[in-house]
Image (cartoon, rainbow, N blue to C red):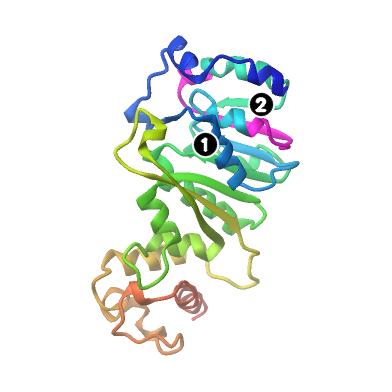
Amino acid sequence: MDGAIASLPPLRDIIRDHDLRAEKKLGQNFLLDLNLTDKIVRAAGNLSNMHVFEIGPGPGGLTRSLLRTNASKVTAIEYDPRAIKALEGLKNAAAGKLEILHEDALNTNLTTLSNAPRAIVANLPYNIATPLLINWLKQIDDDSTAYHSMTLMFQKEVGQRITALDNTKPYGRLGVLSQWLCDVEMKFDVPASAFMPPPKVVSSIVKLTPKKRQKEQPSFKTVENLTAAAFGQRRKMIRSSLKDYRQYFEACSLDETIRAENMRVEDFINLAHLSERR
């Protein structure tokens, strides 16, 4: 299979032959450097016997790198019909290892597509990256074994929000939700020049590894609502932004004069859990 993939036309030729110009409305920015796509795959760690899902493969650069791993199968979810046609040659060369689904990733539950250990490795379309992550976190909340890992490319600003610690400017709702359910790690930055066309921002690779589910923890909805209230008025003290939860502050050892950015992830989870129990 490796030889068949290596003999495929260069990605630039694939883009030209299929008139696969990146569409801004689809959040498309294509990675053409296979050394870089190989680096992303290495950041994902051991994918042996994994069913790997990729979102928005475009001309298939990252897909080629994934197919050279020991993953048992690669499923690429693609919304753009032009890319579906452009990937046909790669699918043929993959000798049954690659499945291409013409679907909207926002409406696709990946956990229903495979019973094998699942991983996600993707250069996410910028315009749907955050809602996709939220969807996957909800699935992990339901089942901590839903995904072995998620190695994802975001705009650097979003990556910083996912990995930010409390008492820092980027820390917010997305970081709390992500770090509650996953161990998160910023792997490396990807310069705009690596893409075609180059975006106006730097991108980052973030790896999220689901944590083992605790026996007692609040519902995802409760934590969502709590963090939305807290960070929706992040400059206010929590006695104001979280006034509906004020009766639980003492039990959670929370000073009502602090702000949301001063609360640790575990503070949010404890507060959410206590509010559900009483």
* Residue 73: percent from left, percent from top: 70, 33
In which image quadrant can residue 175 be found? bottom left
Give the amino acid at mark 1: Leu
Question: Is the residue 226 above or below the residue 92 in the image?
Answer: below
Give the amino acid at mark 2: Leu
Question: Is the residue 108 above or below the residue 139 in the image?
Answer: above
Instruction: State yes or no: residue 80 in magenta.
Output: yes
Q: Is residue 226 left or right of residue 43?
A: left
Observer able to see residue 66: yes
Q: Which residue is mark 2?
A: 98
Nearer the observer, disc 2 or disc 1?
A: 1
Q: Which residue is situated farthest in the front direction here?
A: 35
Rounded to the nearest angstrom, the CA distance separating label 2 from label 1 is 20 Å
Tell me what residue is drawn at x 63 percent, y 45 percent. 119
Tell me what residue is drawn at x 53 percent, y 17 percent. 10
Of 178 and 29, nearer the camera is 29
Observer able to see residue 109: no
Residue 36, numbered label: 1
Q: Which residue is situated farthest in the left direction here?
A: 235
Residue 199, numbered label: none
Please tell me how many numbered marks the rendered image carries.
2
In which image quadrant can residue 230 be found? bottom left
The local crowd at label 2, few if under 14, some if 14 to 19, many if 20 or more residues have their Cα within 10 Å, is many
Q: Which residue is situated farthest in the top direction here?
A: 17
Q: Is residue 67 left or right of residue 62?
A: right
Of 6 and 145, nearer the camera is 6
Magenta residues span 66-84
* Residue 264: percent from left, percent from top: 44, 75
Question: Is the residue 174 above or below the residue 194 in the image?
Answer: below
Quadrant housing the N terminus: top right
